[in-house]
Amino acid sequence: METRRDGRWTVPLVSGLLIGTSLVTDVLTSVTWPGRLMMVAAAIVAGTPIVRNAIRALTARVVGIDLLVSVAATGAVVIGEYWEAAAVTFLFAIGHALETATLDRTRSALAELVAVAPDVAVVVRDGQQVEVPAGEVAVGERVLVKNGAKVPVDGEVVDGTGALDESSITGESIPVEKVAGDRVFAGTIAKGGFLQVRATGVGADTTLARIVHRVEEAQDAKARTQQFMDRFSAWYTPAIIVLALFAGLLTGDVVLGLTLLVIGCPGALVISIPVSIVAGIGRAAKDGMLIKGGEFLETSARITAVALDKTGTLTEGRPRLTDVVVLDAGSDRGEVLTWAARAEAGSEHPLARPILAAAASDGRSTPDLPERTEPVPGKGIAATADGRRVLVGNAALLDAYVVDTVDTVGAGQAAAGLAAAGRTPMIVAVDDRVLGVIAVADQVRPDAAGMVADLHAAGVSEVVMLTGDVQLVAEAIGRTTGVDEVHAGLLPEDKLDAVAALQRAGHVVAMVGDGVNDAPALATADIGVAMGAAGSAVAVETADIALMADDLHKLPEAVSLARRTVDNMRQNITIALATVAFLLLGVLLGGVTMAIGMLVHEASVLLVIANAMRLLQPAPAPSRPPADPAGTITTGADRTRSPAASAR
């Protein structure tokens, strides 16, 4: 790599020495031919790679910048303008070397990601610590992570405690404490403690490898504007050749025609968009935000509405049992909870876990699974246990099973009261008898309101919550977080309809969801966003924007970065077009030679690159009030969010 980097300067260095020697020779001697010969030699040295690239492009049926410079330099030599030929090719060569060197810096984020990839691992084999290449660790093998070492594999902590710097994955520089059961990622760095890790992902099957792959693909993916500019350049460059030819023939001024070839070079225009996209996507990757490519970056810059799932996005996603209301005179709290746990024992729904956990903590174990379990989408669950029908869900579930011989009115009133308090109620009925109502609740994230405010500050006009929870619970969260609209009681297909309605209203919509239950809405939205994607290979590979950390503020950061990147692209296009217009005016008014034209062009290319590199700098953190835990509320949990819920 170093040899290649050093080699990029060889051609301009040799060409420059020949030009300098020629100028000195002209000053010291009265003989002109040695100086002219060295000028031609300088043009040949610097021009040979340009001609070679022009021929290579022509074989691919591409009329590129190299052809313009090749024709201009050759023509200058033919008409005896040796200085112009040498100066044009020398400046083009040195500009190309500078361009390559600075462009490499715009890909620094990818280089840094590759650099953090671990080389070796310490594993335990036959009771001995053995150092092996990281790629040779077997899945399931025990890996030791000592203080200061890189974690060589993805895995699960099986013993020990320690702190890991996960900034290479999540963008967060504050070390995260790890204990047994926690997940760790390859490329993170131990900042203290000692961990024993069971390897679950090695080599290309690690989160870091998937991130590197995604960033590589994203930086090479063309934006719509870039595709347009490519088509424009395919016509623009031949048009410049025709214009130069006509100008030379009509005026009889060959130098004018050759000068038009040089000033018409679209170098800055061609590079104006890709350099911004590479820098923008690189900056996003360093901050733990994976953007799928230039097209998605441009679309993200136009986002005007954000649709948010509730559970796990605005709330912690860890509901717990809060209430058990007994309605049947012959029952007690324990019986209501036991029957609910018996039914939920066969369920994969997240709401089953707090019910089972509460039953277990009360010493009411549920050793036997129900004979039959039937999830009812958006309503609850129907099970058969010990030969009896058990319903756990909302009033609509009781109506669906025609539970008409019981006091469903009382159950409905109790459920409404719990919902008004921000909890998710579930009526428990056995056969045709309502035993009571249980309720679970989730905690609103402390930074949810700040995230909504930041989205508004970033230019998003509508922040909408889509939830399968009941209206009262949803409204309570809406008031706390400051979202603009609340849509409650939605089934997965209803969320899709809500996103489509926003699009029909003219919005460019981003949808934030868990990627499973929200899959239809995510697919319909203009941009699908996955949060906390570090532990999900599917999310990293499929989401339009994958936020590696489970950090709400990354969402407005991603929107702001996309807008800054598109603004940067527009600035670069303006610089490129203004340069061509300025040079054309200079040629018409006189005073702009081929050498000056090439000098200005190369300066514009470097200016465009320097402008794009500003994106690599971290964005200033928005000023926001500290999160107020006291301001959060305990609220209900969405019964339609999880994979299990989507099946109900």
Image (cartoon, rainbow, N blue to C red):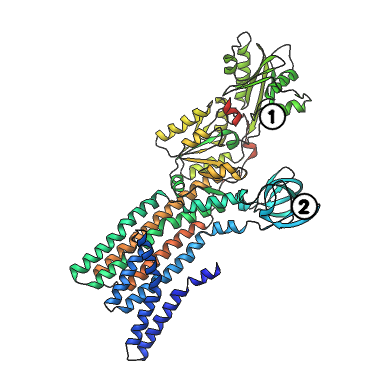
Which element carries disc 2, helix, strand or loop? Answer: strand
Q: Compare marks 1 and 2 and give the one earlier in the sequence.
A: 2
Amino acid carrying label 2: it is Val
Q: Quadrant of the N terminus?
A: bottom right
Amino acid carrying label 1: it is Pro
Q: Quadrant of the C terminus?
A: top right
Between 307 and 206, the one lying in front of the other is 206
* x and y percentages locating residue 112 in the rendered image: 58, 58
The residue most toward the right is 127
Which element carries disc 1, helix, strand or loop? Answer: helix
Residue receiving disc 1: 354
Q: Residue at (48%, 49%) from the top-left corner?
A: 293
Q: For residue 606, what is the image quadrant? A: bottom left
Q: Residue at (23%, 72%) from the top-left corner?
A: 254
Residue receiving disc 2: 124
The residue most toward the front is 59
* x and y percentages locating residue 126 in the rendered image: 80, 52
Whether residue 552 is visible: no
User: In the rendered view, would you say 167 is above or below 466?
Assistant: below
* x and y percentages locating residue 492 in the rendered image: 52, 29
User: In the rendered view, would you say 42 is above or below 603?
Assistant: below
